[in-house]
Structures are given as C-alpha cells and as structure tokens.
Image: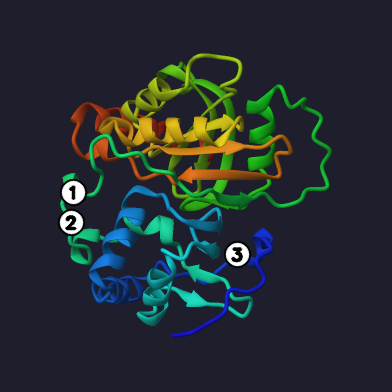
Amino acid sequence: MPFDKVSKSTKEINQLITSDYGNHDYLIKLINKISKLSPDTKAVFCKWVKYGFMEGVQAEISPMGTVIITDWSSEIDPMIHDLINNKVATLNNDGFVEIPQMMALADQINLDLACDFDDGHLIIDEEVIYPSPMIMRLPHSKEVIEEPYDDLTRLLASNMKKLDYYLNGKIMHVGINVKSLGIMNTIVFKNPIDVLIITNNKYLIAHKVLDPSKTVHRGLSALESYLMDGMDYAILIHRYTYYEAHVETFNKIMSRPYIRDSGFAVVPNELDYIIFFKWPRYNTIMSKSQSVVSRRSLISGIVNFMLNAR
C-alpha cells in the first residue's frame, strides 16, 4: 500500500483524540489482525506493545496511549506498510500513521493470543535498546503557574492537572508528596509518592520525580517501592539532561524484571510536554504477591472513601 510521508510537524493534543476503541468486539478483531502480521512485523510490534516502547520512529502519544507515528527510519518502513495493510494502524489525511490506544493494549488484551513469544525471548540479556521519544503534549492553560522550575514536582503536578484523562481513566485527584493515606495514616509509604494521580476507576498512578543533574540517585528503588506498595502504575520522571543518560536509565529499568512494568519519561525546560521513553504497564506484582494484593485492598477502601467524600 504505497503512501507518502508528509506533514512531519507535531500535532496538538486535541488532534490525538480517537474514538473509544476499548470495546470487546474491537479488541477481538484486533487480536485477529495482529496474528496476521508478517513474522518480522509481529515480533517487533508485539515487543513494543508488551514493554511500552518504540524504536526507529518519531511519535506523539495521547494521555490514553494512542500513538501517532510522524516519521520513521527506512528499516521500519516495511513494518509500517504491514500494519496499515492489516488494519492494525490507519493512515490519516496528514500522512501520519495512527495506532489507536497502542500503548494500552497490553493491559486490555492477552497478547499471547496474537503474538508468538515467550517472556524470555523478547529482551536479550545485555541488549542495549535505544528507545524513540514519544511526546505527550499537555494542553494549554489560562492559569499562571507561579511555581519555579526548580520545584519540578509541583510544576509537573500543576501541568498534569490540565489533563482530563490519563492512562485509563478520568483524573479525579492529583496529590503531591503523598506519605500516607487514610485519616489515621492507615497506609504509610516507605518512599513518599512525589505525584499521585487517582482516576475515576480508582486506579493509582505513582510518579517519582527527580533531577538527575542534582543527585547520584536515579529513582529505581522508589519504583520498586511503589509497585510493592500496591500502586497500579509507577512512572519515573527525570528532568531532561541528555539522551545517552536517559537511554542508560531506560535500559536499567528493562534489565530489572521487578520494575520492568514501570514507565519512564523526561521533561524539558519548558514543561508543556512530557517525553515518554517507556509507557507504564499495569503492576503484575499484584498477580504474584498476596501481601501486595492485601495492601492494595486496604488502599482501595481508603480511596473509595476519599473520592465519595469529595
């Protein structure tokens, strides 16, 4: 299916909104479409979806995980054609390639039904991955942000409040430096959550925020703590320094199975967008640890009470 790559400029966030693709019939059809991809395309696409990253492309991403590929390398070109031919992706009027809710699919479908892989066959030990930036633009606001950029956590929280939806639901609450939950501090977190977002479907999204130029720490232990504390999603946010440093952090996350579900992003000097290198995956520790499940159950009760009292 021949087509031209045109209009390489980035798109505003309201242009990335797609229809509701989360219905059961769509997902069943999608599994069938993915299974029909060529072996080479399927191997790469399934790896991207499973772990939440991309390579060899320029892309924008919506807060709900829809990916718009605006440019790509020649090595990726056959894959792009295959995705469009099999209707996994669509080509829009601007020449961009759209994959609805691509980064949310791993949490919506059983990839084993469409992909030919075992967990150990996708990520090779000592493999260095160079992830493509996925730009998530934040909507413009008429509010004046008074916080200095040095207070990166507060500034990020202020900007995230501008979003209506994030990951898998409507944003209901954004908390800063959350050390505990409950009237009597029923749940105390080992590592305070720098930015905690709670959605209308009661999902908890924990963010660790730091400037790697000001500390030797990278925030990986906080990710582990968040996941063990029963957060549904954990995301590491770094202030942008340089690409090679972020590649190193990304690969450290990928090489550690106990935090591999985590997301990783960086923020530039002008915080009007977030650059994701790795989209988060739902916390799979909760399917393996009864203690984490029990703790999450307590948190759910507190969150329900808090949201109902608003």
* Viewer-closest of 266 and 43: 43
Figure quadrant of residue 151: top right
Q: Quadrant of the N terminus?
A: bottom left
* Viewer-closest of 125 and 136: 125
What x and y, as percent, mark residue 44?
Answer: 32, 59
Q: Sequence-wise, which precedes: disc 3 or disc 2?
A: 3
Q: Seen from this angle, which residue lies furthest bottom?
A: 1
Q: For the image shown, how many numbered marks are present on the structure?
A: 3
Q: Are marks 3 and 1 in contact (CB under 8 Å)?
A: no
| Residue under the point 23% across and 72% down | 35
Q: Is residue 87 above or below residue 69?
A: below
Mark 1 falls on what kind of element? helix
What x and y, as percent, mark residue 300?
Answer: 38, 36
For label 3, count other residues whose C-alpha is less than 10 Å away and answer few (under 14), some (14-19) or many (20+): many
Q: Which residue is mark 2?
A: 117
* Colour style of the rendered protein structure: rainbow
Query: Any mark on residue 16, and which?
Result: 3
Is residue 36 at all visible to an observer of this figure? yes
What x and y, as percent, mark residue 292?
Answer: 26, 29
Q: Are marks 1 and 2 in contact (CB under 8 Å)?
A: yes
What x and y, as percent, mark residue 133?
Answer: 53, 48
Q: Quadrant of the C terminus?
A: top right
Callout 3, which amino acid? Leu
In front: label 3 or label 2:
2
Find the distance from the CA under tag 1 to the CA under tag 2: 6 Å
Q: Which residue is mark 1?
A: 121
Callout 1, which amino acid? His
